[in-house]
Image: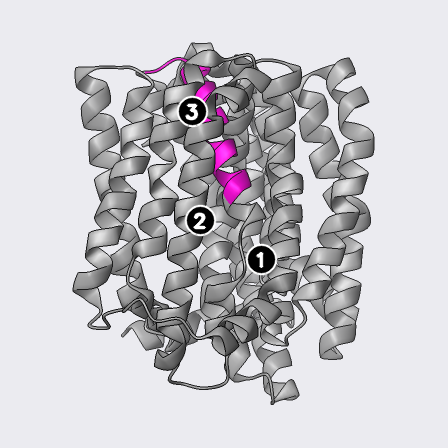
Amino acid sequence: MLIVLARLLAPRQFGLVGIALISLSATRNFSNIGLKTALIQHKSANVDNYLDTAWCLEAARGAVIFGVLFIFAPLIAGVFDEPSATPLIRVIGVGPLLFGLRNPGIIYFRKDLEFHKEFVYNVSGGFVQFFVGVGYALVSPTVWALVFAYASADVFRFGLSYLVHDYRPWPSFDISIAKELIDYGKWITASSVLYFLYKEGDDAFVGWFISATALGFYQYAYRIADTPSSEVSEVFASVSFPAYSKLQDSPSELRQALLATTRLTGFVTIPMSLGIALVAPSFVPVVLGPEWTRMIRPMQLLALYGLFHSITRNFGSVFKALDRPDIIAKVSALRVVCIALLIWPAAERFGIEGVALVVVGVYAFPMLPLDVYLISQLTETDPMAFAREWFYPVVAAGSMFGGLWQVRKMFEVSPLVELIALIPAGVIVYTVLCFLLARYSRWQIEGDIRSIVGSLG
């Protein structure tokens, strides 16, 4: 949807919606009390007696978020010096209201590892969002195409939640259950606040310090570059969290599952990240259009962030499954401090490229080594075991990137021809190198792939 709409809308329009989405994300993260996580992590297979209370809490949270966004929308828009964002913020604020009222029974999709149902629920909403957004933009190419796209997905998923699961909530509230859920979720709340600050604080800073147009470029570059994490490793993390929760009393099996997930995630996402950096100079003008070329360099830098983010994404699932969400909060606090110290001078000197460089640099050090150290200590896993799982895809993907980068410099062709040639060439080169590494080294990825193919069959 975003790629199609980039051809129909201007960068500034994406920046205006970006302001609304930042406002929505801030209120959601600052009020996240971790109810879903607490229910999934709970050792009991049946949590029906918790659902009504959780539903009441979520409904109240959604109503508060909607009210805050509706009342303070003019003030928020004024902070960014974009008064035209006011109605956008108010309409997008309907999403949390519907989210809070959806059927709490769908929590069983993840808790019971019924991911085919989770898939149908999420993807069907994505299709609605795509058709509404693109359809509206074809008739009226304005910023409202994006707003109605997001709102339509929320409306559809609200109704669908009551069709795909037979649980029916009732406004019943148990104080003792609420205290139990909130007690687990207090660190989730802290983590969510810090998650917003380090994940979207840079977006808010760009929109406030530079402009809404710069925000449109930066957010687009970020979303595409973070695709390996947001659209791929997030799937692995979603699957692994309930699986890790079921293995929380079996340390050896948990370690094996953690390393297997790390190996598979790296195999898929590392070449994606380096591939995004490789094709960015041709992808942007061909697919998005020439007016988006300002985002090429930030997109290439943020592709490295997507790499680091993707290969450590499932660590958070382990922390939560082992009842240590406090680790996520404490690590996130350190990252926020590091970014806050560096982002202003970097943006002032280098613009959005400087902001991207800070985000990548802080994740590379100290966050990545620290994440590996903490997960190793918690699960009693050799830190080098993670390095070994990443070594092989880094060698294969790095060789692919370096080789094709040099080949591209040897030929002068149009961006379209370059893009058409680079993507299949990258896939072929990486696949061949992985085959050779799997055959002549101790890399176990071939066994993982056979296992997945066998389960699908």
Residue at image location 45% in from the left, 33% down from the top:
69
Residue at image location 66% in from the left, 59% down from the top:
390
Disc 2 is placed on an element classified as: helix
10 drawn magenta: yes
Disc 3 is placed on an element classified as: helix
User: Which of pointers 2 and 3 lies earlier in the amino acid sequence?
Assistant: 3
Q: Is residue 407 above or below residue 151?
A: above
User: Which of pointers 1 and 2 lies earlier in the amino acid sequence?
Assistant: 2
Residue that label 3 marks: 17
Residue that label 1 marks: 266
> Which numbered dot is residue 145?
none
Figure quadrant of residue 337: top right
Quick check: 336 left or right of 220? right
Quick check: 232 left or right of 129? right
**Which amino acid type corresponds to the residue marked 2 in the rendered image?**
Glu
Disc 2 or disc 3, which is closer to the eye?
A: 3
Q: For the magenta stretch, what is the residue range?
A: 9-27
284 drawn magenta: no
Residue that label 2 marks: 231
| Inter-mark Cα distance, 3 to 1 | 32 Å
Q: In this rendered view, identify the residue nearer to me: 388 or 10.
A: 10
| Inter-mark Cα distance, 1 to 2 | 14 Å
- The quarter of the picture where the C terminus appears is bottom left
| Inter-mark Cα distance, 2 to 3 | 21 Å
**Which amino acid type corresponds to the residue marked 1 in the rendered image?**
Gly
Q: Where does residue 286 sit, x and y in percent of width and height? A: 39, 19
Evaluate whether residue 127 shows in this view.
yes
**Which amino acid type corresponds to the residue marked 3 in the rendered image?**
Val
Residue at image location 27% in from the left, 69% down from the top:
170
